[in-house]
Image (cartoon, rainbow, N blue to C red):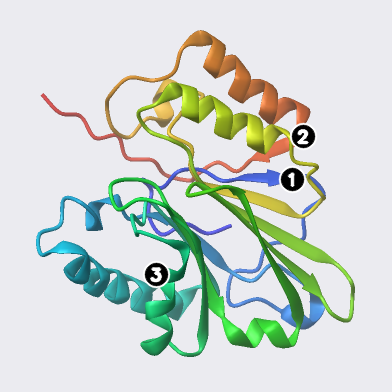
């Protein structure tokens, strides 16, 4: 699993995974196509010029990411509806844009990948939690093996909603070769925090830890992590 920079949230991986591929993936052997996770909240409400200007900046970001990665997972996309991502199809006709989003103020996730993957995989989309959690399964047509990518943006400010989203993840029957990535808005260790702000109550922390344990998820650590301190 490759990430674009050291400040991105860590994904978690279901055990018995396929070996990762450092490039666009040896698809014939069913290794994992390269993928990247990016929270783009800095391109949202803080960006002047409205949603049109934000879209222009997202297009530039995608142009950069899609050069190196087959699957791009974006969080906090802040668009009014799932179908709004279809606007990108006119700009990048060789890619699929799957999304779940319900608000221009917060949340929303999207998974983007080249249409050529459809030649090798049967691709299934499932919304786990509207506006926040999206699952995409790639089932190899010849080998019958599947890779599931679950892209998450767990609620940043409402802890009750955050707990419901964790419970939605905990209710899933995860198959091997499942990757869960995104922004969980929670860290299990203080040294993993790259910003500042409050974290969850003890009960919520235990809920998250229990989910990781009972789901047999393996955490993928980052090689580098930059801590930003502000006065």
Residue under pointer 3: 84
Does dot 3 land on a helix, a strand or a loop?
Answer: helix
Q: x and y percent of residue 112 in the render?
A: 51, 71
Q: x and y percent of residue 62 in the render?
A: 37, 73
Answer with left or right where residue 46 lies relative to residue 84: left
Residue drawn at 29 percent across, 50 percent down? 41
Task: Say if mark 1 contacts mark 2, CB within 8 Å.
Answer: yes
What whole-number distance in Å separates the C-alpha atoms at marks 3 and 2?
35 Å
Mark 1: few/some/many CA within 10 Å (<14, 14-19, 20+): some
Residue 216: mark in rendering: 2
Does dot 1 land on a helix, a strand or a loop?
Answer: strand
Toward the viewer: 200 or 177? 200
**Mark 1 vs mark 3: in front:** 3
Toward the viewer: 71 or 75? 75
Answer with left or right where residue 215 lies relative to residue 134: right
Residue drawn at 34 percent across, 59 percent down? 79
Q: Quadrant of residue 208?
A: top right
Does dot 2 land on a helix, a strand or a loop?
Answer: loop
Q: x and y percent of residue 93 in the render?
A: 46, 90
Query: Where 11 sits versus 23, above or below?
Result: above
């Amino acid at each position: 699993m490759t990430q674009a920079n050291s400040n991105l949230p860590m994904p978690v991986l279901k055990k018995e995974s396929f070996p990762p591929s450092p490039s666009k993936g040896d698809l014939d052997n069913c290794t994992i196509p390269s993928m990247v996770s990016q929270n783009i909240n800095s391109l949202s409400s803080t960006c002047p010029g409205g949603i049109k200007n934000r879209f222009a900046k997202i297009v530039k970001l995608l142009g950069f990411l899609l050069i190196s990665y087959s699957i791009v997972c974006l969080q906090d996309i802040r668009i009014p509806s799932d179908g709004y991502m279809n606007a990108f199809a006119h700009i990048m006709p060789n890619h699929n844009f799957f999304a779940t989003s319900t608000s221009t103020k917060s949340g929303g996730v999207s998974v983007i990948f080249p249409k050529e993957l459809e030649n090798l995989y049967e691709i299934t989309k499932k919304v786990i939690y509207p506006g926040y959690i999206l699952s995409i399964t790639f089932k190899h047509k010849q080998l019958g093996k599947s890779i599931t990518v679950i892209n998450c943006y767990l609620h940043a400010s409402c802890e009750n909603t955050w707990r419901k989203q964790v419970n939605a993840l905990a209710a899933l029957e995860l198959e091997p070769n499942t990757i869960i990535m995104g922004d969980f808005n929670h860290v299990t260790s203080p040294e993993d925090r790259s910003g500042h702000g409050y974290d969850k109550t003890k009960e919520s922390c235990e809920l998250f830890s229990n989910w990781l344990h009972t789901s047999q998820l393996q955490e993928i650590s980052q090689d580098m992590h930059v801590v930003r301190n502000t006065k």
